[in-house]
Amino acid sequence: MRDKLYINGEWVAPLEGGALPVINPATEEVFHYIPAGTAPDAEVAVAAARAAFDHGPWPRMTGVDRAKILRAMAEGIRSRLPELTRLEVMDNGKPIPEAEWDLTDAAGCFDFYAGLAEELDGEVEEIALADGRFTSKAVREPLGVAVAIVPWNYPLLMASWKVAPALAVGCTMILKPAETTSLTALELGVIADEAGLPKGVLNILSGKGSIVGQALIDHPLVDKVAFTGSGPVGSRIMAAGAKDIKRISLELGGKSPFIVFADSDIEKAVEWIMFGIFWNQGQVCSATSRVLVERSLYPALLERLVAETKKIRIGDGLEPGVLLGPLVNKGQYEDVKRHIARAVEQGATVACGGKRPEGFEKGYYLEPTILTDLPLDSGAWVEEIFGPVVCIRPFDTEEEAVRLANDSRLGLAAAVMSADDERCERVAAAFRAGIVWINCSQPTFTEAPWGGYKESGIGRELGRWGLDNYLETKQITRFTGKEPWAWYLKG
Ligand code: NAP
Ligand code: MG
């Protein structure tokens, strides 16, 4: 079914668009084609999602019944794990263990929101009013038709972070995967169908963001857009939503700091710094790409970090034992190389990496890279690179480290490592970021809120906070007074 769009429970050919090639970044070969949805397909999909919301069973079912279908979707992902893993690796380039991890997490996300769907049933908050002639209560309702636009770094997982909570509360949805990685998202249509999701509740439109994505965010019958991706597209979505006051949630990446104090265990510091930037080829919105190390530890830590980084096994994600695959596509590969070249022009020292690894004729491979001596206003220190590139510098005082960490227009994540728990708590409180890790970097849990401060976004995904993106709150107030209101009719 991966060559058709999934609209209103049917697999249909795009009305006007043709097919887009899918390239394996490890080999640069086309191994698949996906359908290129355009504006007329968006029109049909929005109408289907609108009808399913306004007249269909989904928003009117109990949470307990919706949960059964969400759990079947979780099971559908799990039962296809080897097949989906292979697709995700060939589509995105990530090594097998990472793809397995992501897909298992995606299944867990459907299970988690199934649990919350059950709890939502009958959730009513009685409100104590000062005026005893009235009683009031607040209820929560699904907000309507939601669009999810997702990036290529965690293809099915980023889709699940949006689809699972939206469906849990009773919204209907149109999912637009990234053009570079649409295969597992399209497979979610097969899974939804098998799970018994009613027609039109989930619609999946692959195609170009600038065409089908734009048509979706501009559509007046869409109530909500949930987006993960770049800042410029995030701004465009807010602007499009401003016309008709769409609900918008955005997750736009970061330039996240990792402060390492000198009392840290050097081996643990090296491990978490590496995990913080090289996992998923560094194509991680929360990657801790700016590392600040207390000066007395800096030389020894840098030496260990360079030595371990050089040992990372690079290769096709399908090969067992590989820990760093190719970057996702040619554009991203060229972009990251440009960032490194500019960093060098601006005074950076390349402590290791910075180039294509030897022995690779094909594929978008780049060595894991450590940059030092960066001026604080250089592009590489300030801008998100979104590749396996870490910038590292020494600091002298806690105050300086926190100031440098917070000196960014972005504020998605931040990490701190120290043997001193009080210091960790103090620094965690001082960080201007939505996600803070102490003595680690990156572990992400479905139960905990995810999202950024400042220009890293608006709103929170995951946990019970993730439901707020798809709910409206309604107050229902009743007049119970014994005496007439007597404003106009004074008797
Ligand atoms: P992007 O352009 O923001 O793409 C994200 C999603 O938005 C894709 O599905 C894209 O579709 C869609 N899109 C693009 N233009 C659109 C429009 N006018 N209307 C509606 N949807 C639109 O990001 P990218 O080009 O893939 O990556 C560029 C940079 O974004 C990266 O280098 C990185 O800095 C950042 N990024 C951040 C995250 C994150 O997790 N926060 C993830 C990925 C990338 P197409 O794929 O068809 O263009
Ligand atoms: Mg793009």
Image (spheres, rainbow, N blue to C red):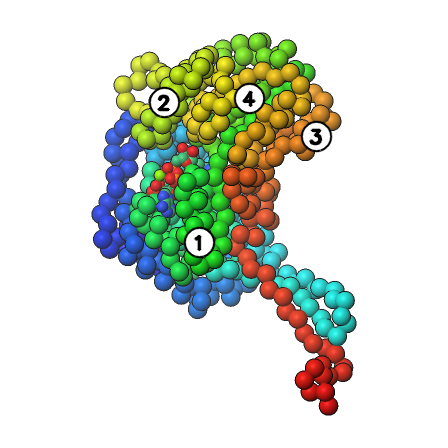
Q: Can the viewer see residue 204 in this picture?
A: yes
Please name the amino acid that badge 3 sits on. Glu
Disc 2 packing (10 Å; few <14; some 14–19; many ≥20): some
Q: Disc 2 marks which residue?
A: 337
- Inter-mark Cα distance, 4 to 3: 18 Å
Please name the amino acid that badge 4 sits on. Val
Please name the amino acid that badge 2 sits on. Lys
Q: Can the viewer see residue 81 in this picture?
A: no
Where does ligand 1 appear, by image quarter?
Answer: top left
The residue mark sitting in front, 2 or 1, is: 1
Q: Secondary structure at mark 2?
A: helix
Q: Is residue 126 above or below residue 228?
A: below
Q: Disc 3 marks which residue?
A: 425
Which residue does the image show at 49% across and 17% down from the upper left?
Answer: 374
Q: Secondary structure at mark 3?
A: helix
Which residue does the image show at 53% across and 27% down from the upper left?
Answer: 288
Indicate the quadrant where residue 117 lies. bottom right
**Quadrant in which the C terminus is drawn:** bottom right
Disc 4 packing (10 Å; few <14; some 14–19; many ≥20): many
Q: Closest to the observer: 267 or 390?
A: 390
**477 to the left or right of 318:** right
Please name the amino acid that badge 1 sits on. Gly
Which residue does the image show at 44% across and 44% down from the upper left?
Answer: 235
Q: Secondary structure at mark 1?
A: helix
Q: Is residue 156 above or below residue 163?
A: above
- Inter-mark Cα distance, 1 to 4: 36 Å
Q: Disc 1 marks which residue?
A: 241
Mark 4 and mark 1 in contact (Cβ < 8 Å)? no
Mark 3 and mark 4 in contact (Cβ < 8 Å)? no
Numbered tag placed on residue 291 in the rendering: 4
User: Could you say where residue 305 lies in the image, as x and y percent from the top left?
Assistant: 52, 14
